[in-house]
Amino acid sequence: MTESGKPILYSYFRSSCSWRVRIALALKNIDYETIPTNLIKDGGQQLAIIEYLEETRPTPRLLPQDPKKRAYVHMISNLIVSGIQPLQNLSVLKQLRQENNLPWAQKAISSGFEALEQILQGTAGKYCVGDEVTMADLCLVPQVANAERFEVDLTPYPAISRINKTLLALEAFQVSHPCRQPDTPPELRA
């Protein structure tokens, strides 16, 4: 916390993890201070931060009260955060020869998206789980951006693409976007 009582977010403009937390802060209208950090890799604490925000600032809800829907949100969030995103992190890609990075990342994302697309067929409404923005949606948008960065063909994933487009139209997703962060290099700014 700053002296003014604002929370501090140590953030890197392109970090999926930081982006998820920025979306949550924007949705909950929490004013915060950003301290840009040059991260080499994303961490896994963002879901814990989002759950803390949910407990301390319960509106708008990012976790449904309905236990079944809440379970779906956790399932989708964990699939993305633990099963897809880490496989295209810089720390993983450094272990491969440079020419293998793009195919490796594309395969990892496509494999995860195949599973996610199947899940969304049964859970999606306007968003990942029904018609309210949830923690699952906060995980989806940064992962789709990673997929686009790694040139993954999104045609086979119509639910993912539709939900992503709907979410990107929301103000919280726009203001938290990597191209609008204080540490975004000028050539990548919106």
Image: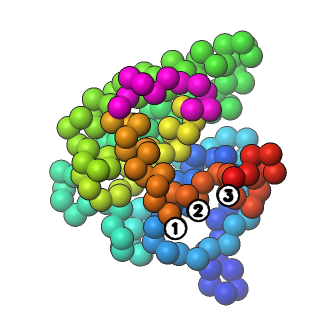
- Give the camera-side residue of 10 and 128: 128
Residue 163 vs residue 24, the one in the foreground: 163
Left or right: where does residue 189 sit relative to residue 186?
left
Secondary structure type for disc 1: helix
Q: CA distance from mark 3 to mark 1?
A: 13 Å
Residue bearing the label numbered 3: 180
- Residue topped by disc 1: 26
Q: Which residues are magenta?
A: 148-158
Q: Nearer the viewer, mark 1 or mark 2?
A: 2
Residue wearing tag 2: 175
The reply to whether the C-beta atoms of the residues labelled 1 and 2 are less than 8 Å apart is yes
Looking at this view, name the residue that lies furthest to the bottom.
Answer: 4
Q: Nearer the viewer, residue 184 or 58?
A: 184
Q: CA distance from mark 1 to mark 2?
A: 8 Å
Q: Position of residue 118 (x, y in %)?
A: 27, 29
Disc 3 residue type (three-letter): Arg
Mark 1 or 2 closer to N-term?
A: 1
* Sequence-first tag of 2 and 3: 2
- In space, the residues marked 2 and 3 are separated at their CA atoms by 6 Å
- Of the residues shown, which amino acid type is indicated by label 1? Ala
Q: Residues within 10 Å of mark 3 (few under 14, many from 20)?
A: some
The secondary element bearing badge 2 is classed as helix
For the residues bearing labels 2 and 3, Cβ distance under 8 angstroms? yes
The x and y percentages for residue 72 are: 26, 46
* Total marks in image: 3
**183 to the left or right of 64:** right
Give x and y (percent) for residue 17.
Answer: 57, 49
